[in-house]
Amino acid sequence: MKTKIAVYGSGTIGACQATLTSGNGYPTVVIGHSEAGLNRCRAVISQNWDDLIKEGLAAPSNKAGAMALLTITNDPSALAGSGMVFEAVAEDAFVKKRVYDQITAHCGTDAVIASTTSSINADVLAGLLENPSRFLVAHPFQPVHMLPLVEVVCHEQTSDKTVQTVCALLAKLHREVVVLKKSVPGFLVNRLAQTLFRESIYLIEQGVAAAEDIDRAVKYAVGMRYASIGLLEYYDAVGFDLESTIARNVYPDLCGATEIQQTTLDGIASGKTGQTAGIGLYDWSKKDPDDFRRRKQSPYFSGVRDWEIPG
């Protein structure tokens, strides 16, 4: 029997994390805080499996086997016996502190805790729990059960044993791991993403290009290029001389905003805040949600073939 894993948080990240661990044969307990949240969690996990089955990557028996490994509950005492806990609750240090206290109460002071936070400094969170040497950040990306990368972020007191334990588990889950030796705002991926978001909003505001054309440029040039070779491999391949010439021409004109941009502020003020609201940069009433969900997952389908799927 594989080690029991816990996921504290029944939102989308928690549900997809649980899909991944149970889908690789690990008994998994998900802790939520409301019946409505638990029902949504079950629905997300079930939909994840239905999508995999539709793509021919799993069978109904695999779904049944994985679901049988799941316990989804509001009772924190179900944490007992978990060898590792993924914390996936709200981005609020006070909320996380209460969760860490619950984990310690039911799992002891040696249970490894990995936060899925995308924005809170690892050193800040480490200060919220007993024996911080067992804590680090393991930041995944959506869809969590399919996108392979996880950012492991250490803090000053993270033990080598904790890093080894977390990285070994992630490797078994067929994850690609990058380890940050210290915490910085946004870690790696979100720092890179924010530069693209900021520049893209700036280009829209300057009347240079529409959202559709910016997305087309990313999908069919930036995204495809860096899916096969690394960003810095490309930098080296172009060479420092040419890159420095391009930089001299482009750097002075890049967006340098240090505050939230007007397009985003206007969207928040008007309620046009994106997909959930039905409109943001795009009118989502004109998009097929099933098609979007499939496109969001499609680059990662092949990785599921390496899962140790039960059933």
Image: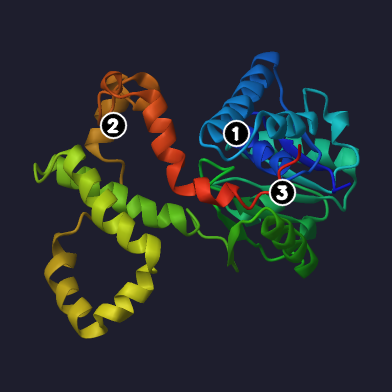
First of labels 3, 2 by sequence position: 2
Kind of element beneath mark 2: helix
Element on which disc 3 rests: loop
**Residue lying at 30% horizontally and 47% vertically, measured from the top left:** 197
Instruction: Please say if 153 is above or below 116.
Output: below
Q: Is residue 257 visible?
A: no
Q: Position of residue 108 (x, y in %)?
A: 90, 46
Q: Nearer the viewer, mark 1 or mark 2?
A: 1
Where is residue 175? Give x, y as percent: 61, 56
Residue placed most toward the observer, 95 or 41: 41
Give the residue at mark 1: 90
Looking at the image, residue 279 sits to the left or right of residue 30; the answer is: left
Q: Residue at x 19, y 72 (%)?
A: 247
Would residue 107 be found to the left or right of residue 67 on screen?
right
**Separation of disc 3 and disc 2 at Cα?**
45 Å
Mark 1 → mark 2, Cα distance in angstroms = 22 Å
Please give the label number shown on residue 308. 3
Please state which amino acid type lies under the numbered disc 3: Glu
